[in-house]
Image (spheres, grey):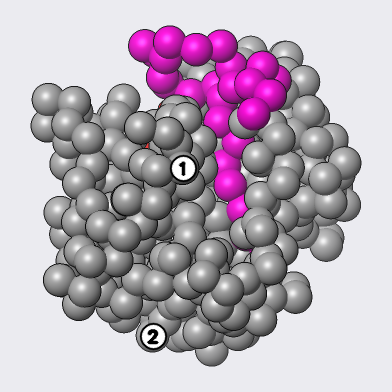
């Protein structure tokens, strides 16, 4: 079957399946000459001032990855990354273990390449991330440092990394995933909180602000799409920090969803309460994985449900004035982290491994076009 026929039949089946589950997928609208039918890419369909982003694959724990680093090597990937998106997030290339692999050595090359590519393609960059419990290098986690030394290490890292990209990064995920699912600060598994206490969060924001006064500084997490104990904890913490004059600019929800679970219908309500604090909001890491036992192919119904979830995430963001940035965590199944981390799940992105656009892609594009 040709790629086009596959796509056409998938779209038709997806529309039928959407009707079945009552999902408001209008995946095919854009191609039928509906609103925004002339918008050929996501970024061109987006309303003015609204950026649509993708993570830039590479540098992860994809230990069994059967491919060379995609960003520098895959020409089709690069072409689509430049053409479809107006914002880039390094998936791993600015994380501690990657950019600061030894105490006295930084590795900036891959991050520099992304920032340069973004410039060339008129894209903004979301920096990710400065204070996190994961992907810290062994020299740091296993080193024998005093509290004062650790503090100095974090301060220097933030000054160095944020300073290097000063003026070229639009939004920074300063603090990533600092709460657990019950809304308790990760004072055990987060090295910084454990060794230096929760006050280090405010310091990280202050240091980042000093290094780049124009970058918008964010808290970022998963499982905070809706109103729940964890997002409540963020609301309380950020309110306190703002009262103390700490330079926090934004709160972002990652959006790693699964078709196994219900959609977080209160996304817009949740984002709005952060917007009401005067914050920017953003959706930063969307993917929607599905059950694919024994290497099964996605069914039309699964693709339709996935498209529906992507669309509703985007609609939730578009409904909130301060949500001006929506990023997918990779745009092709070829390089997705999902099957590596979730056995028997996958197909979580908006394009197949062969870069064929799925119903989710068209759902995003027509939703963006309708919002213009
Ligand atoms: O996609 C990233 C993957 O390549 C890494 O191996 C993994 C290791 O922790 O991190 C993934 O990205 C995460 C992001 O940085 C923070 N939110 C959750 C993402 C998915 O795990």
Which numbered mark, 1 or 2, is in the foreground of this view? Answer: 1
Residue farthest toward the bottom in the current orientation of the protein: 276
Point out which mark residue 115 bears.
none
Residue 16, picture quadrant: bottom left
* Label 1: which secondary element: helix
User: Residue 366: x, y in percent?
Assistant: 53, 70
- Residue at position x 42%, y 65% in the image: 27
Q: Is residue 123 above or below residue 150?
A: below
User: Residue 200: x, y in percent?
Assistant: 55, 51
Do labels 1 and 2 touch, CB within 8 Å? no
163 relative position to 238: left or right? right
| Label 2 within 8 A of ligand 1 by Cβ | no
Question: Can the viewer see residue 289 in this picture?
Answer: yes
| Label 1 within 8 A of ligand 1 by Cβ | no
Residue count near mark 2 (Cα–Cα under 10 Å), binned few <14, some 14–19, many ≥20:
some
Residue at image mark 1: 4
- Residue at position x 66%, y 81% in the image: 372
Is residue 143 in the magenta section? no
Residue bounds of the magenta highlight = 51-76
16 relative position to 134: left or right? left
- Residue at position x 62%, y 31% in the image: 77
Please tell me which residue lies in front, 6 or 58: 6
* Upstream in sequence: badge 1 or badge 2: 1
Give me the C-alpha separation between circle 1 and circle 2: 39 Å
Point out which mark residue 269 bears.
2
Please tell me which residue lies in front, 93 or 47: 47
Total count of labels: 2
Is residue 75 in the magenta section? yes
User: Residue 74: x, y in percent?
Assistant: 63, 21
């Amino acid at each position: 079957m040709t790629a086009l026929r596959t796509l056409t039949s998938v779209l038709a089946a997806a529309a039928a399946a959407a009707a079945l589950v009552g999902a408001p997928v209008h995946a095919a609208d854009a191609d039928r000459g509906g609103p925004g039918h002339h918008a050929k890419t996501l970024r061109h369909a987006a309303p003015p001032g609204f950026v649509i982003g993708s993570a830039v694959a590479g540098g992860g724990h994809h230990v069994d990855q059967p491919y060379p680093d995609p960003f520098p090597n895959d020409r089709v990937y690069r072409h689509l990354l430049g053409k479809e998106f107006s914002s880039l997030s390094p998936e791993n290339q600015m994380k501690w273990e990657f950019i600061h692999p030894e105490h006295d050595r930084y590795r900036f090359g891959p991050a520099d390449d992304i920032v340069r590519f973004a410039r060339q393609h008129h894209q903004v960059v979301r920096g990710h991330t400065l204070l996190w419990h994961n992907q810290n290098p062994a020299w740091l986690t296993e080193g024998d440092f005093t509290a004062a030394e650790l503090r100095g290490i974090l301060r220097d890292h933030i000054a160095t990394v944020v300073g290097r990209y000063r003026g070229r990064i639009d939004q920074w995920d300063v603090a990533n995933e600092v709460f657990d699912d019950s809304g308790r600060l990760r004072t055990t598994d987060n090295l910084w909180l454990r060794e230096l206490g929760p006050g280090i969060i405010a310091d990280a924001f202050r240091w980042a602000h000093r290094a780049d006064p124009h970058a918008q500084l964010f808290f970022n997490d998963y499982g905070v799409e809706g109103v729940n104990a964890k997002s409540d904890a963020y609301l309380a913490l950020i309110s306190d920090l703002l009262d103390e004059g700490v330079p926090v600019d934004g709160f972002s929800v990652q959006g790693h969803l699964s078709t196994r679970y219900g959609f977080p219908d209160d996304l817009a309500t949740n984002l709005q309460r952060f917007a009401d604090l005067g914050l920017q909001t953003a959706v930063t890491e969307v993917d929607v994985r599905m059950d694919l036992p024994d290497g099964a192919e996605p069914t039309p119904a699964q693709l339709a449900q996935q498209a529906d979830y992507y669309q509703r995430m985007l609609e939730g963001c578009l409904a909130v004035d301060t949500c001006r940035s929506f990023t997918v965590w990779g745009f092709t199944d070829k390089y997705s982290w999902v099957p590596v981390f979730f056995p028997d799940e996958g197909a979580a992105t908006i394009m197949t491994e062969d870069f064929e656009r799925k119903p989710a892609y068209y759902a995003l594009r027509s939703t963006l076009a309708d919002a213009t």
